[in-house]
Amino acid sequence: MEPVDQEKYRESLGRLESIFRSISDAASEVSTWRCPYKNVEDRCTAKFGCRNQDRPATVGELYLCLGSDDLDYRSAWEPSN
């Protein structure tokens, strides 16, 4: 096994950190106007209750998200009682 080039290793970690920081920053920004649990079909993937969930007619189907993307969703996440 060849020795690890420490400089290349640190550069690689730096690039990965930059990529993940960018993803995290984008997710944080989007979470202020779009629920992170809403999928592309406007279905809720959360495993907890939210006041924006419309109960499905079909058992096993994901709830439809009735929330507006113009709102800050962070206050809508409530544990089910």
Image: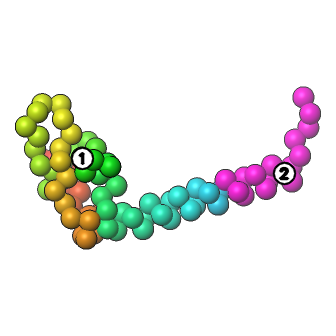
Q: Residues within 10 Å of mark 2 (few under 14, many from 20)?
A: few
Identify residue for label 2: 8
Q: Which mark is residue 24?
A: none
- The reply to whether residue 17 is visible in this rendering is yes
**Quadrant hosting residue 18:** bottom right
Residue drawn at (70%, 57%) of the image = 15
Residue 74, x across and y down, in percent: 28, 64
- Span colored in magenta: 1-16
Mark 2–mark 1 contact, CB under 8 Å?
A: no
The colour scheme used here is rainbow
Report how many numbered discs are placed on residues in the image. 2
Q: Is residue 8 above or below residue 47?
A: below
Q: Which residue type does callout 2 highlight?
A: Lys
For the N terminus, give its image quadrant. top right
Residue 45, x across and y down, in percent: 28, 44
Is 5 colored magenta in this rendering?
A: yes
Q: Is residue 30 left or right of residue 14?
A: left
- The reply to whether residue 75 is visible in this rendering is no
Residue drawn at (11%, 33%) of the image = 58
Residue 6, x across and y down, in percent: 86, 49
Q: Residues within 10 Å of mark 1 (few under 14, many from 20)?
A: some
- Distance from label 2 to label 1 (Cα)? 43 Å
Is 27 colored magenta in this rendering?
A: no
Q: Is residue 18 left or right of residue 12?
A: left
Identify residue for label 1: 43
> Between 75 and 41, which is closer to the camera in this rendering?
41
Of labels 2 and 1, the one closer to you: 1
Residue drawn at (67%, 53%) of the image = 16
Q: Is residue 6 left or right of residue 34?
A: right
Q: Earlier in the sequence, mark 2 or mark 1?
A: 2
Residue drawn at (39%, 64%) of the image = 30
